[in-house]
Image: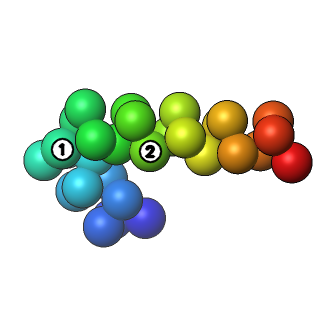
Amino acid sequence: VNGSILYGFIFPMNWEMMETINFYIIIKI
């Protein structure tokens, strides 16, 4: 969890993009 927060803090855009991709994958499945 700490790594995820740290990654999101350093790369906010990339983190949001990853969440969007994960959300899309969940809907696709």
The span from disc 1 to disc 2 (Cα, nearest Å) is 11 Å
Q: Residue at x 70, y 45 (%)?
A: 25
Instruction: Pick out the residue farthest to the left.
Output: 10
Residue 21 found in image quarter: top right
Residue 14 found in image quarter: top left
Question: Crowdedness of circle 1 by 10 Å Cα count: few (<14), some, many (20+)?
Answer: few
Q: How many marks?
A: 2
Q: Residue at x 40, y 36 (%)?
A: 17
Which amino acid type is marked by label 2? Met
Instruction: Pick out the residue farthest to the front.
Output: 28
Q: Residue at x 25, y 32 (%)?
A: 13
Locate residue 15 relative to residue 12 in the image: left or right: right
**Labelled pair 1, 2 in contact (Cβ < 8 Å):** no
In-front residue for pair 4/27? 27
In-front residue for pair 11/6? 11
When the figure is inspected, residue 19 is found, relative to residue 6, above or below; the finding is above
State the residue position of label 1.
Answer: 11
Position of the N terminus by quadrant: bottom left
Element on which disc 2 rests: helix
Element on which disc 1 rests: loop
